[in-house]
């Protein structure tokens, strides 16, 4: 069956793509203004800072996929190794039947290892991926449905906060079905301490006591290895970050000359995070027509574009406890560089 129809319960648009695929576009909880307002606020503040989510336009997403293939960027390979070798063991730790929810599903290439392990045990599975890109969500869903006949998908085009709120109120799992929420790819690293805790608390509110959250997190390690992962010798990460200025030029009428900006990374030992910056090579003024804004830079002044926090297992356990979970078990890749962490929702304190 094809076509689309509106849902009377959903505060958004429901599209029935096929018998096994439904997509919901939910109203976003992001402040009005979107990309333009984020740029206005970020470039008007001191020091200048732009949210890392702005890096992922169509070209940015392609460049990031290329980053995952360069030799220095170990994160994707390490996490894939864990999920490929340990998904069966992980699923054995959980009750049956399972329902799978994923935050920021993207291409779902690593998720397929878990889907395969779950289907091997229970025969059918409902998968609820959440992503801001409807086209990416539909593409990955169609590929998964082709690969796994026992799978059905209800995808949510939304940010995490809105989708988790909707799931908690409107999409409770059937009696006897156990939810497993995924947050893979070390995306937790892009959040500061307060935001990371806030995310865990949001996930906890969407779960019943005893249900589970699988959290991927990059581990602290040698600074040289960390910095190389975010500044590869081919320059793909540099191009990925500079593309943000290209996007501002294209969408907002900016006049950035990208040859006048350098890409720099550093590791802040005290905060345990890699920081990425675009640095102005000279004093300059950059008009952005659609914002009626002129942005001034001193020579050497930077735009902070991304932070990637690194954890140790004790920090992850503490974060889990504060967020309403019990740190149940973890799995590491063969190089002990990356971790998958299984957290169990505990009853709320009286």
Image (cartoon, rainbow, N blue to C red):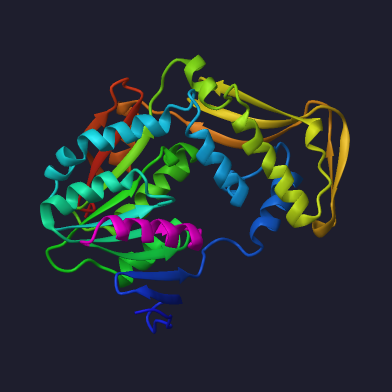
Residue 321 picture location, percent across and down: 28, 40
For the point 48% across and 25% down, the residue is 272
On screen, residue 2 versus residue 151, left or right, reads right
For the point 32% across and 56% down, the residue is 144
Q: What stretch is highlighted in magenta?
A: 130-150
On the rendered image, what quadrant is the N terminus found in? bottom left
Query: Which one is in front, 299 or 197?
Result: 299
Residue 313 picture location, percent across and down: 30, 27
Q: Is residue 40 above or below residue 311?
A: below
Query: Which one is in front, 84 or 214?
Result: 84
For the point 42% across and 70% down, the residue is 24
In magenta stretch: residue 139 = yes
Residue 243 picture location, percent across and down: 68, 42
For the point 32% across and 41% down, the residue is 215
Q: Quadrant of residue 74?
A: top left
Q: In this view, does 167 lie above or below 246?
A: below
């Amino acid at each position: 069956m094809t076509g689309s129809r509106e849902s009377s319960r959903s505060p958004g648009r429901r599209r029935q793509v096929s018998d096994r695929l439904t997509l919901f576009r939910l109203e976003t909880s992001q402040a009005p203004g979107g990309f333009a307002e984020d740029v206005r606020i970020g470039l008007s503040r001191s020091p200048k800072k732009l949210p890392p989510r702005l890096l992922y336009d169509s070209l940015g997403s392609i460049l990031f996929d290329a980053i995952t293939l360069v030799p220095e960027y170990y994160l994707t390979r390490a996490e894939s190794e864990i999920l490929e070798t340990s998904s069966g063991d992980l699923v054995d730790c959980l009750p049956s039947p399972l329902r799978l929810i994923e935050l920021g599903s993207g291409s779902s290439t690593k998720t397929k290892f878990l889907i395969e392990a779950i289907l091997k045990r229970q025969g059918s599975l409902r998968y609820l991926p959440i992503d801001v890109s409807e086209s990416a969500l539909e593409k990955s869903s169609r590929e998964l449905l082709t690969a796994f006949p026992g799978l059905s998908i209800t995808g949510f085009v939304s940010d995490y906060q809105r989708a988790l709120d909707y799931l908690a109120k409107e999409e409770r799992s059937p009696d006897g079905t156990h939810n497993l929420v995924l947050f893979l790819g070390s995306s937790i690293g892009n959040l500061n301490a307060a935001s990371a805790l806030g995310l865990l608390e949001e996930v906890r509110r969407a779960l019943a006591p005893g249900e589970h959250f699988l959290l991927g997190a990059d581990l602290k390690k040698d600074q040289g290895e960390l910095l190389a992962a975010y500044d590869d010798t081919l320059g793909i990460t540099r191009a990925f970050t500079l593309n943000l200025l290209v996007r501002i030029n294209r969408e907002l009428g900016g006049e950035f000359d990208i040859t006048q900006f350098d890409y720099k990374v550093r590791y802040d030992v005290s905060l345990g995070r890699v920081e990425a910056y675009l640095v102005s090579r000279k004093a300059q003024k950059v008009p952005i027509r659609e914002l009626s804004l002129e942005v001034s830079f001193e020579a050497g002044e930077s735009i902070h574009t991304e932070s990637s926090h690194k954890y140790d297992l004790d920090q992850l356990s503490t974060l889990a406890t504060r967020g309403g979970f019990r740190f149940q078990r973890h799995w590491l890749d063969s190089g002990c560089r990356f971790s998958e962490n299984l957290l169990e929702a505990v009853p709320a304190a009286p």
